[in-house]
Amino acid sequence: MKLSMVGFNGRCVFFQQDNGVQRILLDTSNVYDNHSSVSMGELEPAYGEGRQKEPFSKQLGNILQSLGNRNLGHILMMTLLVKELWKKTRPLRFLRVGGSLADPPDLRTAEMLELFCPDSSLWHMCRDMDGSLPRENILPLPMKTELRPLADGSFDVLFLDDAAGELHPDRIAELLVKLRPSGRFFCLTAQRELADACRKWLPKAEYLPLEKGTQFLSHELSYEEWNTAWNMTPQGKLAEKKRMAAHQLEQLQKTVASLASAGREERKQALIAAGEADKLFAEIYPFLASVEVKALSSQFRESLIDWHLGNGDPARVRRCFSALLEDLGRYRDISVARIHTEMEWDC
């Protein structure tokens, strides 16, 4: 039985599946059409021989060969990474999750990144943090690191290297948002659960079957896919609750601004909106700098209930609502800037 393989004939890197079907992954002659940062002198030894140590095609062949036949998934990643690098004229930030620190894939990836742009960096999130780093552009991160300090959309390439089966599918959404929209996503895994999770988040990703049930995934992340993943992260869910709270306040503003003319149905809707806002503020309270917002929200809701039952003073409702809006004025992400805190009340 034939095995999947990657071949390089000096010009093209191709992938051959176990059924014999071949597919060209990279044609080095297209370097000119892609406006590559690799010069003609680096590509062809006959062009400006004094300007380079060896042609780029030979360097690429040596790098791929050094990974060995057993690292088929890493060879695929490296080949498609080169195709991505050809389009870049700036430093590229690469995030690898899984695998061993400073192993051959790390060294070859760092070497290739440096070849295209010396300021490029390889951030590696892994379990084994000990050992020397032979290259300055390899930056280690602990596998259990808190991802929030890493800015969303700060990486150009994300590679989930699950060759050892150590990545949990639940982390995909949180990792995806670290990749910028239109960034390149790679995944190497034999885990069915991880592959299925990738299919869930990236239904248009390309899958290449390798040996022993291993799959290699490649995809360019769209903004819609990035936004979907972000909405499912803790910060995305928090932002949605803040947006909902702002919406409830906008609805309440209309009623509070015209208390005297509000009908019975309007009063009911105002009570519902106040109750929903009160629940939302209780949920997001730990993430707000204010120590008053939960109490102010409850006071406003109580004043609204008293007014609805005929026992309250409309002026108290307005005072409570104004105090709540004033306290929320510091939070732009709750959109309170669009709500006027100085309103002309009807009498």
Image (cartoon, rainbow, N blue to C red):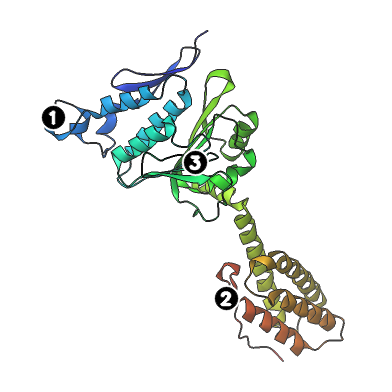
Residue at point 52%, 21% (across, down): 210
Q: Nearer the viewer, mark 1 or mark 3?
A: 3
| Residue type pointed to by label 1 | Glu
Residue at point 72%, 83% (across, down): 320
Residue 260 seen in the figure: no
Q: Residues within 10 Å of mark 2 (few under 14, many from 20)?
A: some
Residue 203 seen in the figure: yes
Q: CA distance from mark 2 to mark 1?
A: 63 Å
Residue 53 located left or right of residue 222: left
Of labels 2 and 3, earlier in sequence is: 3
Residue at point 25%, 29% (across, down): 56
Q: Which mark is residue 49?
A: 1
Of labels 1 and 3, earlier in sequence is: 1
Residue 127 located left or right of residue 68: right
Q: Quadrant of the C terminus?
A: bottom right
Q: CA distance from mark 2 to mark 3?
A: 44 Å
Residue 282, percent from left and from top: 73, 67
Above or below: residue 252 compared with residue 38: below
Q: Which residue is mark 2?
A: 330
Q: CA distance from mark 1 to mark 3?
A: 41 Å
Which quadrant would residue 322 be assigned to in this image?
A: bottom right
Residue 83, percent from left and from top: 36, 33
| Residue type pointed to by label 3 | Asp
